[in-house]
């Protein structure tokens, strides 16, 4: 993938280069370097000598050079590319030999995140984590030279199976650590100097974290980390005695933990997930993942992405203990900030500290088996974002999608590699030719699903709009709403009317002595005064009275067109009445800048197309606005989640906004606050980018790209807090089940 392109074209499918096609049916594994040899040889030439290329812009030849920035892969492929084995004890490819691991029943866990805290932090002395105080420092940061020094201890491994070794497995010495080989990429002269050579895939980390959390919350037999062995691990480390197995009448009782839901809560949780409706094109229908056993199954990686960041923080509001709930919400918001399109260095520095606090708090809540290597890798994600920028160009979503396309090329299943190769060559040729065919529809000229129409080029923004209406039109009469519409337009049409508004207010000051009435007089008289002013200037032929200003000064036609759906700036909106019939939710709207004191939330009731003289048109939304007055009791902000009372109304006499001012939101039921309360979630649509304008007064050296603030309200879980439910009966286990678990223990 070429990275010297804008973010919206960097990951486009037409820009992927299929450099290698490895024969199956099995993965080459550690022998991956054999297939990389031709590619590495070409990369050496591209770095040292370069190749001659032609620049169309300057009409001249130049020497093209290229280098690998980093690799993007899932975790098993990380081992094949880097040479560091991702199996065993020292699994973390960042901590390397300083990986903090513990042996528990049947597996390893990766706790000990207190080592990242300051030396004076009170949690270092707390034995409630793993039964011991933490005196170790954080893992060292290994440079490329340090890694090369470690690789000197690694013997050159011959690719393929060893003929003289019956076990067919090379024995590694202690000095070799977890290195299986020296990667062929170290032959590149710049590879050891790179600050980040391999990316930790956020997509798969997020998927595994989501499965761990949801599986444990719902006590899923296949995915829960709160197993019988997990309770025995707590007893082995002498922590959280209230969760130990208890013998009762020849059986063992498993106390119900606070981090798992009861059966009734599981039903309500799954009922909530089943009721979720997301905006059009935002995600798949997640309600299909709810099973009859009140668990979630069949979730794809993007389903987990949306569930973890948008739905889970709302779903747990009414069920879990407050401190557990806050910690999980912080964890979800960490991924939300990390996956944003825009990031700031200062926020990432805070996130480096924040994720350590989150993981330490999770260590006090969940059993040790919860902390798989994927949970531990979260601690390294902010540092990689500092080095590599936002996650979207560095994760596997686009790559997995492209791999699925390549698999779809297969027609001859006896020769899948040949099918892919031939189809790829044809695809490259078609892509090349289609870039030059402007008069026919191609993959480059074909409009997106939510494409909008470009309006005529008017000077005033109020008449410039990119809106495509959908469905059959209806008609209505403005009546008294005409004055409300005109007043709103006159106050939201930009800076063109500032001089006229100022002039009219000065006239009011001269003619009226009651200062408290000036605003009311201005609102009542300005439309008629401005209309008369424009008419006089128009008659006199004054160029100031442009067609746009003259059209705006007149009332719109009393008869207007009503639409049920429309697409504005690439976003699909539907009126509430029609929207309730769909599986998706496209009626939520909000307006107001994030920096304003008040942001207005509501639902779309009607889409108006207003006709003005001289062929001008304006599209407006009639909305039902909820009362979001910060001084009132109809809006609550908890854990950075905004809940509104949908039974309240605001601005009933002024319900209009310009269609281009609307931003889409969707609403989720707030089970904690009860009926009529909904949590607002903002939508960041794909294929839509906010391009910042250059500002000479802003220092861009601190920016690497992000969109929302990353402040986390840290709350400390105290050592004496109980983590089991006193009012819930535990599970009874037979003694022979317990004996089997003891037999699995390897000291």
Image (spheres, helix red, strand yellow):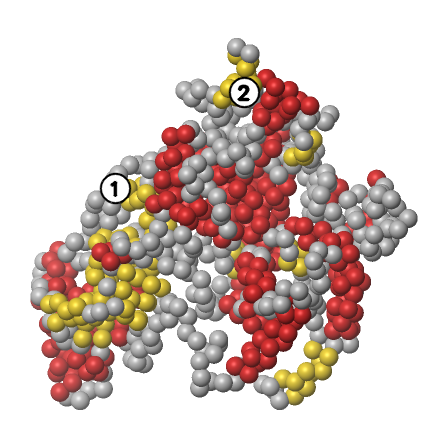
Residue underneath mark 2? 733
Q: Label 2 crowding class (10 Å Cα cut-off): few <14, some 14-19, many 20+? A: some
Q: Residue at x 56, y 44 (%)?
A: 208
Depth check: 261 or 131 in front? 261
Depth check: 250 or 498 in front? 250
Q: Position of residue 520 (x, y in %)?
A: 12, 60
Q: CA distance from mark 1 to mark 2?
A: 42 Å
Q: Residue furthest right?
A: 164
Task: Report the disc number at residue 576.
Answer: none
- The vertical placement of 598 against 249, above or below, is below
Q: Label 1 crowding class (10 Å Cα cut-off): few <14, some 14-19, many 20+? A: few
Disc 2 secondary structure class? strand
- The vertical placement of 550 against 353, above or below, is below
Q: Position of residue 450 (x, y in %)?
A: 37, 67
Quarter of the image where the C terminus is located: top right
Which is more N-terminal, label 2 or label 1?
A: 1
Residue underneath mark 1? 676
Q: Position of residue 576 (x, y in %)?
A: 24, 56
Disc 1 secondary structure class? loop
């Amino acid at each position: 993938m070429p990275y010297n392109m804008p973010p919206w074209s960097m990951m486009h499918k037409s820009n992927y280069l299929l450099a290698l096609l490895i024969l199956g049916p099995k993965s080459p594994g550690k022998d991956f370097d054999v297939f990389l040899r031709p590619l590495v040889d070409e990369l050496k030439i591209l770095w040292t000598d370069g190749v001659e290329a032609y620049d169309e812009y300057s009409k001249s030849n130049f020497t093209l050079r290229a280098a690998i920035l980093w690799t993007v892969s899932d975790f098993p492929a990380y081992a094949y590319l880097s040479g560091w084995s991702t199996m065993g004890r020292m699994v973390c490819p960042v901590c390397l030999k300083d990986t903090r691991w513990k042996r528990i029943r049947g597996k390893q866990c990766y706790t000990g995140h207190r080592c990242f805290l300051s030396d004076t932090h009170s949690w270092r002395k707390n034995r409630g984590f793993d039964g011991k105080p933490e005196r170790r420092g954080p893992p060292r940061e290994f440079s490329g030279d340090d890694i090369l020094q470690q690789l000197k201890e690694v013997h050159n491994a011959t690719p393929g199976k060893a003929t003289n070794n019956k076990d067919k497995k090379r024995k590694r010495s202690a000095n070799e650590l977890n290195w299986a080989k020296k990667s062929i990429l170290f032959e590149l002269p710049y590879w050891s100097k790179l600050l980040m050579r391999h990316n930790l895939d956020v997509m798969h980390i997020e998927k595994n974290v989501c499965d761990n959390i949801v599986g444990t919350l719902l006590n899923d037999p296949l995915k829960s980390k709160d197993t019988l062995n997990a309770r025995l691990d707590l007893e082995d480390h002498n922590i959280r005695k209230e969760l130990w197995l208890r013998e009762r009448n020849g059986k063992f009782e498993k106390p119900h933990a606070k981090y798992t839901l009861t059966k009734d809560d599981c039903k309500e949780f799954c009922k909530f997930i089943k009721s979720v409706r997301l905006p059009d094109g935002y995600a798949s229908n997640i309600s299909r993942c709810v099973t009859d056993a009140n668990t979630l199954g069949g979730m794809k990686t993007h389903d987990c992405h949306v569930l973890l960041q948008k739905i889970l923080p709302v779903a747990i509001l009414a069920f879990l203990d407050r401190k557990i709930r806050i910690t999980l919400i912080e964890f979800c918001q960490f991924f939300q900030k990390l996956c944003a399109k825009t990031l700031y260095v200062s926020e990432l520095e805070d996130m480096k500290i924040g994720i350590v606090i989150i993981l330490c708090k999770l260590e006090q809540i969940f059993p040790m088996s919860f902390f798989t290597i994927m949970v531990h890798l979260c601690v390294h994600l902010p540092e990689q974002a500092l080095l590599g920028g936002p996650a979207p160009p560095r994760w596997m979503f686009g790559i997995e999608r492209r791999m699925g396309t390549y698999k779809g090329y297969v027609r001859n299943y006896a020769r899948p590699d040949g099918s892919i190769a031939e189809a790829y060559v044809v695809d490259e040729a078609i892509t090349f030719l289609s870039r030059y065919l402007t008069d026919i529809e191609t993959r480059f000229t074909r409009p997106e699903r939510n494409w909008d129409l470009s309006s005529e080029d008017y000077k005033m923004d109020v008449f410039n709009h990119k809106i495509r209406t959908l469905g059959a039109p209806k008609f209505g009469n403005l009546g008294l709403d005409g004055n409300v519409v005109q007043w709103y337009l006159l106050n939201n049409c930009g800076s063109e009317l500032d001089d006229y508004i100022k002039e009219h207010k000065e006239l009011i000051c001269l003619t009226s002595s009651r200062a408290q009435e000036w605003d009311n007089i201005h609102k009542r008289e300005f439309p008629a005064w401005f209309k008369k002013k424009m008419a006089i200037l128009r008659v006199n032929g004054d160029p100031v009275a442009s067609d746009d200003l003259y059209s705006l000064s007149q009332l719109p036609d009393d008869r207007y067109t009503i639409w049920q759906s429309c697409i504005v700036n690439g976003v699909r909106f539907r009126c509430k009445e029609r929207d309730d019939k769909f599986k998706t939710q496209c009626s939520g709207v909000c307006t107001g800048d994030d920096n304003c004191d008040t942001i207005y939330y509501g639902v779309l009731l009607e889409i108006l197309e207003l006709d003005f003289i001289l062929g001008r048109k304006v599209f407006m939304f009639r909305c039902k606005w909820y009362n979001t007055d910060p001084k009132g009791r109809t809006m609550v902000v908890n854990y950075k989640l905004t809940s509104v009372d949908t039974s309240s109304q605001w601005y009933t006499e002024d319900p209009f906004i310009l269609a281009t001012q609307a931003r889409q939101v969707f609403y989720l039921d707030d089970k904690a606050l009860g009926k009529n309360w909904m949590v607002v979630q903002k939508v960041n649509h794909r294929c839509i980018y906010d391009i910042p304008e250059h500002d000479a007064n802003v220092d861009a050296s601190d920016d690497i790209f992000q969109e929302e603030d990353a402040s986390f309200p840290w709350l400390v879980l105290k050592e004496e807090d109980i983590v089991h439910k006193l009012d819930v009966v535990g599970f009874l286990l037979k003694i022979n089940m317990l004996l089997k678990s003891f037999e699995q223990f390897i000291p």
